[in-house]
Image: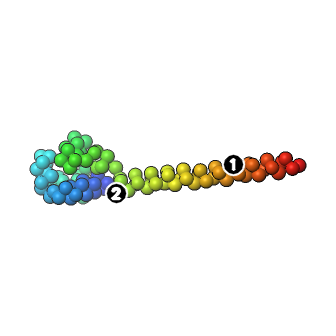
């Protein structure tokens, strides 16, 4: 299983140029605890995630959601809408052709 929470904590921590020890100190846990979260051995409580967000200036979704999946889900939805719009146009065209054929006979 992918360690989304730990990966995101690490990514966001590094983007703020904080060491594990510095983040740990700011949220009153040990650096071993931060390491454990980042490696996926354990996960922080919701309260600790809130504290992490305050320190890293991010939203909870930045930590608990998979941004890549979110991007592809949105992209796939947009693609599906475009494709359905194209299909809808083809269906309308086909209906008009069938009506024209029906009117001939």
Q: Residue at left 46%, top 54%?
A: 75
Q: Residue at x 57, y 54 (%)?
A: 83
Q: Nearer the viewer, mark 2 or mark 1?
A: 1
Relative horizontal placement of residue 38, taking residue 68 as reference (left or right): left
Q: Is residue 38 visible?
A: no
Structural crowding at the residue carrying mark 1, measured as other residues with C-alpha within 10 Å and reported as few (<14), some (14–19) or many (≥20): few
| Residue 47 image position (x, y, % from top left) | 22, 40
Q: Position of residue 90 (x, y in %)?
A: 67, 53
Query: In the picture provided, is 84 more to the left or to the right than 4?
Result: right
Q: Is residue 68 left or right of residue 34?
A: right
**Residue drawn 28% across and 45% down?**
59
Q: Are marks 2 and 1 in contact (CB under 8 Å)?
A: no
- The residue located at (49%, 51%) in the rendering is 77
What residue did someone put label 1 on? Answer: 92
Badge 2 density bin: few <14, some 14–19, many ≥20, Cα 10 Å: few
Give whichever of 76, 8 is nearer the camera.
76
Q: Position of residue 18 (x, y in %)?
A: 16, 56
- Front-most of residues 37 and 104: 104
Q: Is any atom of residue 86 visible in this view?
A: yes
**In x, y percent, where is residue 96?**
75, 49
Observer-nearest of 66 and 33: 66
Residue at numbered disc 2: 2
Q: Residue furthest top?
A: 47
Between the C-alphas of marks 2 and 1, the distance is 45 Å
The residue furthest right is 105
Q: Look at the image and tell me in which quarter the N terminus lies.
A: bottom left
Q: How many circles with numbers are drawn on the protein?
A: 2
The secondary element bearing badge 1 is classed as: helix
Q: Mark 2 or mark 1: which comes first in sequence?
A: 2
Left or right placement of residue 56 versus residue 62 in this view: left
The label shown at residue 102 is none
Vertical comparison of 58 with 68: above or below: above
């Amino acid at each position: 299983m992918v360690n989304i929470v730990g990966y995101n904590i690490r990514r966001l921590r590094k983007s703020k140029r904080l060491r594990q020890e510095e983040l740990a100190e700011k949220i009153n846990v040990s650096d071993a605890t931060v390491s454990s979260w980042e490696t996926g051995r354990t996960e922080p409580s919701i309260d600790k995630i809130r504290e992490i967000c305050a320190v890293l200036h991010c939203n909870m979704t930045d930590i608990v959601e998979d941004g890549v999946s979110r991007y592809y889900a949105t992209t796939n939805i947009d693609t599906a809408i475009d494709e359905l719009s194209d299909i809808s146009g083809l269906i309308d065209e086909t209906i008009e052709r069938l009506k024209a054929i029906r009117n001939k006979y």
